[in-house]
Amino acid sequence: MAMNGSVKREAENQNGEEKKPFIITRMLNKITSTMETGFYMLGMLIGTHPLKCVILSGFVVGIFTLGVLNFTENTESDTLWVPSNADVFKYKNWAEDNFPSTLRTVSIIFVSNNVLSTSAVQAMNNLYKSSVGLTTASGKNYSQICFQAGSNCLVSSILELWSYDDATITAASGTDILNQINSATVSPVSGRPYDVNTALGEISYSSGTTISSAVAAKMTFFIQGDDANKADSLDLETKIANLVQNTRDSAISEYYVLATRSFSDVAGDAISGDVSLLSAGYMIVIIYVIIILGRFNCLDFGLGISVCGILVIGLSLGFSYGLASAAGWEYTPLHSILPFLLLGIGVDDLFVIMGAYKSLPEGYSDRPIHERMAMTLKHAGVSITVTSLTDMCAFGIGATTVLPALRSFCVFCCLGILALFLLAATFFVGCIALNAKRRDDDRNSCACCYKHNALYQPNECSKTELFVEGIKRFYAPNLMRLPVKIAVMVVTAIFLGFGIWGFVVLKQEYNPIWFIPTDSYPYKYDSANTKYFNTGAQAAVYCKSIDYYGSQTQFDSVYTQLTASSYISSGSTDSWFKSFTDWLSTTSTASVTSRLDGNKYPSSSTNFYDLLYEFVTTESTGLRHRSELKFTNTSGVLGVSASYIKYTHNKFTDSTTKINAMESTQNMVAGQFPNDNCFAYGRLYLQWYTNKVIQTELYRNLGLAALCVFVVCLILIANLFTSLMVLSCVIFTLLDVGGMMHFWGLTIDTVTSIILILAIGLAVDYSAHIGHCFMTFTGDRNARARGTLVEMGSPVFSGAFSTFLAFILLAVSNSYVFTTFFKVFLLVVIFGVFHGLVYLPVLLSWIGPAPYMSAEREEPPVSRDVELKVTASEFKSRPSLHGEINPSMETKVGDTAQQYM
């Protein structure tokens, strides 16, 4: 070799002159050399006792896998994506404790040229009669499990204006229908104010406010879903949904249906169906690993070593599930992607180790197995340590998030990556040693008991690493040419420019409907509802056990501000307090007026609660508010421990407006009732709050993870400039991926935020291996960059390509989660590989730092039948080339070098 590695040297600059490095550099180099020595000794131990190592490591991991006995699963989205200490989560728990709801619904949308025609109204009535006539498996019909308004089953539609009387509806003419629609103010079924705008969509008016026709109509069945009726209500929901999907009528062009259970049913079916796609992708990766890790001959076929590699991933998965479950972490639907994430990361480490084994220095192939394993781990150990620690740091930062599902997922990932690292460095290296022993004994790679005779020789074609040879002969030399380098930097700048632009304008938006297939009936219903009905999120102002009697001013102010708010739908605020005080001011009943003061307000607290109870239990205008108040009775004295005032938001199209609407309403209520005595809360506030925190969490996690990646790279790669270059690859990859997400129509949401955090770990893998390997080669920068590409190009590309293969079949999925995973992972692979195998080698060839003090390797020699073209500086600085050049080529090399002198 041109440089004697046995000689201790301080450092060497690019001109070969001795230069004493800074003390920090010497310390970092000492860390690296110590790690290399440690891995060398570990390789010696494993190579000496490979079978014991394989059995012991597998046994230890198997013990940890027993932790799955404590396995628990959580599929409740409210607890998964909302911080447990968030105010909105506390509001949810209080509201559910004080006003538990078991109400379930089935909603139907009818679409026609005119749903107010006699034929369309008859079609709606026919479907209504068919629905209420259905019976559950236990023999119950709708009337037995319906939610009642007084003595009537509550079904919301325009048919309630005729009290669902079949004879009246059948006899109604077109004129009768329009007259009834235009004159309706109160529902004869529920006694509540009736607004036809909530039941009709795309309304046309003949003059002023007179309705002449409508394109859509909505009908909603309300069902009791308490414990006694839950099974029947679920059964009835399914039967009504099936009935609607199978109903055809010439008067109705389209039917759409949505039940309470629809989202969970369809989403579960979609994910279950796509798991089969992931499983098929897993098999594709296994086949690819066999092709890459082996050769097509009887002695070197990669089936055995590939199975060992897959076992490493499987054992790591068991270790992750077992230890995390034992520690009490819950499994969530997000974790279903974990096996494929570990597959992508784990296969990368296996390729690096096999790449180091296949690239052992000349002469090592004939040395004892333990020496081969020692040198393999010396070269590959630090590299996989860098990527494993950086991956763990990225996920470790993610584990500090306030979002429970993401926190749990990152903990599982950290444990899985730890197991991957430990098993790759022990179990897999032991398998390589056993495979090497089999190969040395000329035993068949598939039938180990069969030993080939001395005359058998593997065919020459199978001995050739075609991809490595392609990098050595064509890719690496051409990449080092000056015009190509300039072109690479220009392309990198273009990618970065578009990436920054797209990242800056990337929208934050999240809609739970995205999580179900686009061809499913709930998705179609949601699209129709958005198109025809301008219905916003429903919410309420909840009040605890406060002095309701003394809070007249506050309640009046809340009502005034709610009705005036630009975020709340006009006329949607329904306040029991306002209805109560209006009744008090208009009633002439002596028993009531005698208990009022001169302002028509109860004269005492006792009178207030007594009159309020009379109002909601006996007065027609107060009956609808009965469920909105929770009365107490202490020694015959009435009180109110909880209440709520309903309102409906306008229809919002972006998450920023939703967040502003939520915060504005909450602040308004808090201004009148401090200390959370009253608060604004709606079911969709949970989703809106998640949108509020997820962008902050994303930027925080990305920033902290990038910082940790840099620190780990600095310590383990042991060079500031190389670590900064690796960090630039990670940052550029994230910016490019985030920017392209905008151009692909993706947004910042729960799914993409998770994948962007995962992308840090994957992006590090593609560049850290290159950066570390560059530091282990001696020679000039171009030669070191070429040597790095020859040794690490194939493993890095194979790891990236295997990750892509695991997800490729998800491109045809109907699930938003999986198609988003495919899109973002595709972007990560493309930009990660570009920056790791194209941009970084060029950058290192220009401004790469000096090698480690312990570096001994030079660029592998090019095949003798390949024409060598080197620059003058390379020719002079690398005397080793002189002995490698074929005499017949010497003149040509000299001429080529002379051109650059």
Image: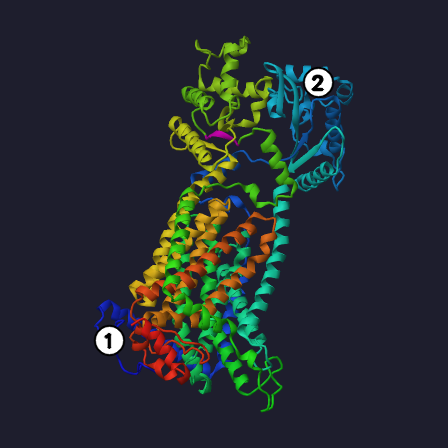
Q: Amino acid at mark 2?
A: Ile
Neighbours of disc 1 within 10 Å: few (<14), some (14-19), many (20+): few
Disc 2 to disc 1, how far (Cα)? 96 Å
Left or right of residue 621, residue 408 in this image: left
* Residue 10, numbered circle: 1
Prevailing secondary structure class for the magenta stretch in the rendered image: strand
Q: Pointer 2: what residue?
A: 177
Residue range corresponding to the magenta coloring: 537-544
Counting every numbered tag in the picture gives: 2
Q: Secondary structure at mark 2?
A: helix
Q: Residue furthest bottom?
A: 454
| Location of the C terminus (image quadrant) | bottom left
Q: Is 723 left, or right, of 146 in this rendering?
A: left
Res 71 → quadrant:
bottom right
Which label was assigned to residue 387?
Answer: none
Q: Earlier in the sequence, mark 2 or mark 1?
A: 1
Q: Nearer the viewer, residue 275 or 8?
A: 8
Is residue 278 magenta-colored? no
User: Is 543 covered by the magenta stretch?
Assistant: yes
* Residue in the image at 43% along x and 40% along y: 692
Nearest to viewer (mark 2 / mark 1):
1
Place of residue 548 in the rendered image (x, y in percent of width and height, measured from the top left): 45, 23
